[in-house]
Image: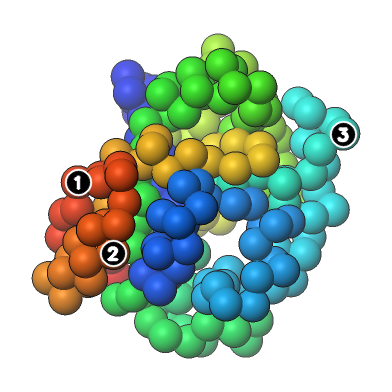
Amino acid sequence: MTTPKNPKIYHIVHLDNLNSIINDNCLWPYSIMQDNPSLIKIGLPDIKQRRLKNSLTSHPKTYVGEYVPFYFCYRSIMLYLIYRSNNPGLEYRGGQQAIIHLEADLKSAIHWAKNNNHLWAFTLSNAGSSYFIDYADLKHLDKVNWNAVKSHDFRDPAMKEGKQAEFLMEKFFPWDLVERIGVYSENENHDVIDSLRIAAHKPVVIVEKNWYY
């Protein structure tokens, strides 16, 4: 598969955290978010801690946990773990229905980052693993395994690795860059729209059942 002309990026978050994101007008990296006990954290704690220690080759003096992470796909492997709810390391056991997808445009995000002195990078696999390759130049975007990114079958280890490619933005990710919010059902659609009443920026909200398991 060739590199998409205008790739989209996706961050998953618990619906109950949306008001906090709107109030702060941004998404925070785990290095900051970890200290907020009121937020529902849906990731694997051991991997989150590893991300605080994993440095980037493209920006050697920074750590993955200092960046807000996005996938290049909806229906991610992390969402699958939440859906299955059988990973012993997973603390959140509330299922996938309350998880929402925040969609943004990759090139718009990079343009904003360059104009606002935020570092950015992308990886070819999970940035929480013990080894990953990262770049901070779009000329390398074709190295992402786009077939794996778009695949719904990740039983093959190579496909599983490639599907977990990430886009990372340092410091914080502006709420204004979120273009759409994908939700599981009309119930979550109603709740998100209710939260957006206080927001100056109101992304489009869509029910996208095919973004879920």
Give the mark toward the camera: 3 or 2. 2
Q: Looking at the image, tell me whether mark 1 or mark 2 is earlier in sequence order.
A: 2
Q: How far apart, in angstroms, are the residues tagged by discs 1 and 2?
A: 13 Å
- Amino acid at the residue labelled 3: Lys
Q: Where the N terminus falls, by quadrant?
A: top left
Q: Is residue 182 something one can see in this rendering?
A: no
Give the mark toward the camera: 3 or 1. 1
The residue labelled by disc 2 is 195
Element on which disc 3 rests: loop
- Amino acid at the residue labelled 2: Ser
The residue labelled by disc 3 is 61
Task: Residue at 64%, 77% (x, y): give it.
Answer: 37
The residue labelled by disc 1 is 204
Residue 119: x and y in percent read: 67, 28
Q: Looking at the image, tell me whether mark 3 or mark 2 is earlier in sequence order.
A: 3
Residue 182: x and y in percent read: 25, 56
Task: Residue at 72%, 68% (x, y): give it.
Answer: 35
Q: Quadrant of residue 123?
A: top right
| Label 3: few (<14), some (14–19) or many (≥20) C-alpha neighbours in 10 Å | few
- For this orientation, the residue located farthest to the left is 186
